Image (tube, rainbow, N blue to C red):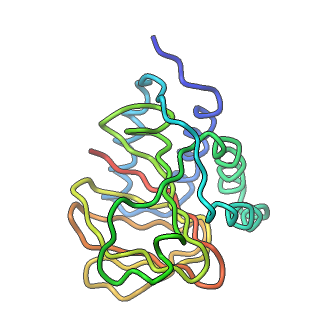
Amino acid sequence: MTERDPRLGAFVESLRRAFDAATLEAEPRASMDRIFAALGDVAPAGTGVPARREVCRHLSAAFAALADAPAPLARLARDFAALEPRLAWKPRPAGGPFASDNWAEGHANAMVIGPGGLEERGDVMIGASLLGPHVRYPDHDHGPEETYLVLSPGRFRHGDSDWFEPGIGGTLFNVPNIRHAMASGDAPLLALWCLRV
């Protein structure tokens, strides 16, 4: 049987506890239950090479803002910070409508679990998105349903909704193929996302 890397295991457990403490409606709660059930089966370690982008300099500010957060979020931030240097931070491969002019250099995504992540699997993807200050991510959509856990201030929209701020520790759920986007203000935006394929 494959054993999960201890630091990755600590992150998965912290993520589960943070979602347990979050307010979720029935559909995203069921999605996260299925994701954590799938993660009970450990997949082989990934072979990705760690990489950082210039925008990653904002991670320390995002982590610092979580130091006084409720215990589940503070623990998640610590476990993610311990894991982060091993991640391959990359830009989104394609643009999209309404992206800010500074979007290309002002964002990075990292796969924690999933293709190219620290644990290679195709049924579940868990990753992070980081936006530097005053960056607007392009509108985009994808087939898998997705639940976000927001770790910093920032605005989101999906479908026909207006922009809204989930707040630190807030969540949002994207049904399959719904158009969605996010944007940062004066502070960097850091969010974790979980997709069930």
Residue 68, percent from left and from top = 79, 64
Quadrant in which residue 151 is drawn: bottom right
Report the residue at 38% width, 54% height from top. 29
Q: Percent position (x, y) of residue 96?
A: 30, 74
The residue shown at (31%, 46%) is 196
Rendering quarter of residue 79: top right
Of all residues, the one furthest to the bottom in this rendering is 162
Instruction: Residue 125: give x, y in percent of width and height.
Output: 39, 44
Nearest the viewer among 107 and 9 is: 107
Up the image or down, 24 lies above or below 12; here it is below
| Viewer-closest of 183 and 178 | 183
In this view, the residue in front, 105 or 60, is: 105
Residue under the point 53% across and 18% down: 3
Q: Is residue 189 left or right of residue 91?
A: right
Q: Is residue 62 left or right of residue 119?
A: right
Q: Residue at x 55, y 39 (%)?
A: 12
Classify residue 178 as left or right of residue 163: left
29 left or right of 45?
A: left
**Residue 95 place in picture, x, y as percent:** 33, 70
